[in-house]
Image: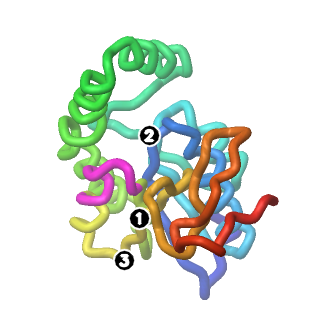
């Protein structure tokens, strides 16, 4: 915490290790640290090394479900993927979205109590994290550190790898740009 500047802010970044969100989320955290802010990451133990490499402090999920190893994560993903689409959605709902919501919220509130911050950056895909962030009474931002798939006017359409969308969600004449 010695890098923290008096005019800077303290952030809690509460995230889960899933779906490719860790690299962009920690990139954001590293940029905040580079600018002199303090960032504590609340996440799966599998994220600790990367969080510390980004210049952040780290706290693991305690009550909320979490992965202690990539082998545990791979096994759970394989178990979920073996189901039909309805079963996959049901498993995600029970394991991440709704089932453990109170536990994620509890961990966010406890971490803010133990390590005071000025604002919470909360994983948007996990309602329990957002609920906990709101319960702290602190300014909260929902972070979606992944591809935004919802059709949105003015944004280019998403397409599978190797395919170019024909037009943006804004309609004809608004084609997506290649990078």
Task: Residue lying at the far right in this picture: please name it.
Answer: 179
Q: Which residue is mark 3?
A: 139
* Closer to the camera in the image, 33 or 165: 165
Q: Is residue 79 magenta?
A: no
In what element is the residue under mark 1? Answer: strand
Local crowd at mark 1 within 10 Å, few (<14), some, or many (≥20)? some
**Can you say whether 156 is above or below 53 in the image?**
below
Q: Which residue is mark 2?
A: 60
The CA span between labels 2 and 1 is 19 Å
Q: Is residue 128 magenta?
A: yes
**Can you say whether 159 is above or below 12 in the image?**
above
Q: Which residue is mark 1?
A: 142
Local crowd at mark 3 within 10 Å, few (<14), some, or many (≥20)? few
Q: Earlier in the sequence, mark 2 or mark 1?
A: 2
- Residue 60 position in % (x across, y down): 44, 40
Comparing labels 2 and 3, the label whose residue is closer to the camera: 3
Circle number at residue 10: none
- Residue 125 position in % (x across, y down): 38, 50
Comparing labels 1 and 3, the label whose residue is closer to the camera: 1
Name the quadrant of the N terminus. bottom right
Part of the protein shown in magenta: 124-131
* Closer to the camera in the image, 151 or 109: 151
* Closer to the camera in the image, 104 or 40: 104
The CA span between labels 1 and 3 is 10 Å
């Amino acid at each position: 915490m010695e890098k923290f500047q008096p005019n800077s802010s303290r952030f809690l970044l509460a995230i889960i290790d899933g779906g490719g969100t860790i690299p962009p989320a920690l990139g954001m955290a590293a940029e905040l640290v580079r600018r002199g802010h303090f960032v504590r990451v609340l996440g799966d133990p599998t994220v600790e090394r990367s969080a510390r490499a980004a210049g952040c402090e780290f706290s693991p999920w305690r009550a909320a479900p979490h992965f202690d190893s990539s082998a545990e994560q791979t096994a759970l993903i394989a178990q979920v993927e073996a189901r039909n689409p309805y079963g996959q959605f049901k498993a995600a709902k029970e394991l991440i979205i709704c089932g453990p919501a109170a536990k994620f919220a509890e961990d966010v509130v406890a971490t803010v109590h133990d390590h005071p911050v000025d604002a919470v950056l909360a994983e948007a895909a996990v309602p329990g994290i957002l609920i906990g962030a709101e319960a702290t009474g602190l300014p909260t931002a929902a972070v979606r550190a992944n591809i935004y798939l919802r059709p949105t006017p003015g944004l280019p359409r998403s397409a599978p790898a190797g395919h170019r969308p024909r037009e943006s969600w804004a309609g004809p004449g608004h084609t997506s740009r290649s990078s």
